[in-house]
Image: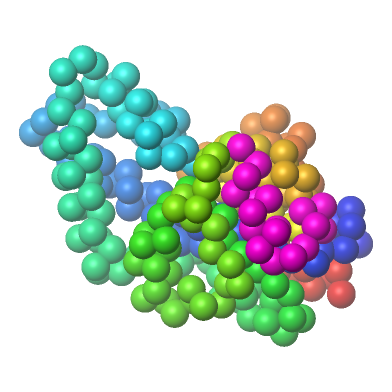
Amino acid sequence: MPFPRPIRAVVFDMDGLLVDTEAVVYRAMQQATVGIADEFPMSTFLQMVGLPNQAGDEIVRNHFGVGFDLTTWNAAVSRHFREELAAGIALKAGVFEILDHLDEIGMPRAIATSSSLESVRASLGPHSIVDRFHALITRDVQNNHKPHPEPFLKAAAALGVDPADCLALEDSHNGVRSASSAGMMTVMVPDMLDPTEEMHSLCIRIAADLHEVRALLAAQA
């Protein structure tokens, strides 16, 4: 068996795992910075991956310094992001295949994300996969955000499955910390963040993509 215990449900992160939004957000931040301040470096953006908006804003303030107009910058980021969203943001490799497999075996699944419900619908709606999840645990219903375990605990409760019997799929370090502390079997599928020693210690596996995760689930049968 590829997992320590039989999997009874799967909980997905969204940004960077199901949909290629992280790269789009970074481009939007770079565009928003033009004419306002110096270049917005990748190293600073990577510190923000997997964090709720308020924590990300604090990193931006620390980077640009006192007096930086964060409100104007955030508005420009949102505008550039919406422009790319309107043009369509690609799903990550293997999304349809893993959802099809979960349908075939009748396994429940949820999304646990730091994004809003509006963002989930905007990002996944054009691909017609929102309704393929049995629960959406967005930031709108969270009192504590990742790396706190609450998002994943709420996802397990919504699915009616013990967290220990859930497989959590994450691309960010804080997401892995959240899922692992919730007691879930956690697989990291790296996007913009490389796995660290800590990630290897918290995860049961580091997977190349969702195709690999689907194969692992199929091997459990």
Frontmost residue, 40 versus 74? 74
Whether 126 is drawn above or below 50: the answer is below
Residue 175: horizontal and vertical position, in percent? 59, 43
Whether 77 is drawn above or below 111: the answer is above
Frontmost residue, 107 versus 187? 107
Residue 126: horizontal and vertical position, in percent? 36, 76
Lateral position of residue 69 relative to residue 135, left or right: left
Residue 206: horizontal and vertical position, in percent? 70, 48
Residue at 28%, 23% in the rendered image: 61
Is the N terminus in the top left, top right, bottom left or bottom right quadrant?
bottom right
Examine the image and state in which quarter residue 9 appears: bottom right
Q: Visible in this render: residue 125?
A: yes
Residue at 35%, 66% in the rendered image: 122
Furthest-bottom residue in this view: 104
Frontmost residue, 18 versus 57? 57
Residue 221: horizontal and vertical position, in percent? 87, 75
Residue at 45%, 67% in the rendered image: 91
Specify the principal SS of the magenta part.
helix
Furthest-left residue in this view: 35
Whether 118 is drawn above or below 142: the answer is below
Q: How many marks?
A: 0
Q: Is residue 74 magenta?
A: no
Residue at 30%, 28% in the rendered image: 60
Q: Which residues are magenta?
A: 148-165
Lateral position of residue 66 relative to residue 123, left or right: left
Lateral position of residue 162 relative to residue 16, left or right: right
Q: Visible in this render: residue 210?
A: no
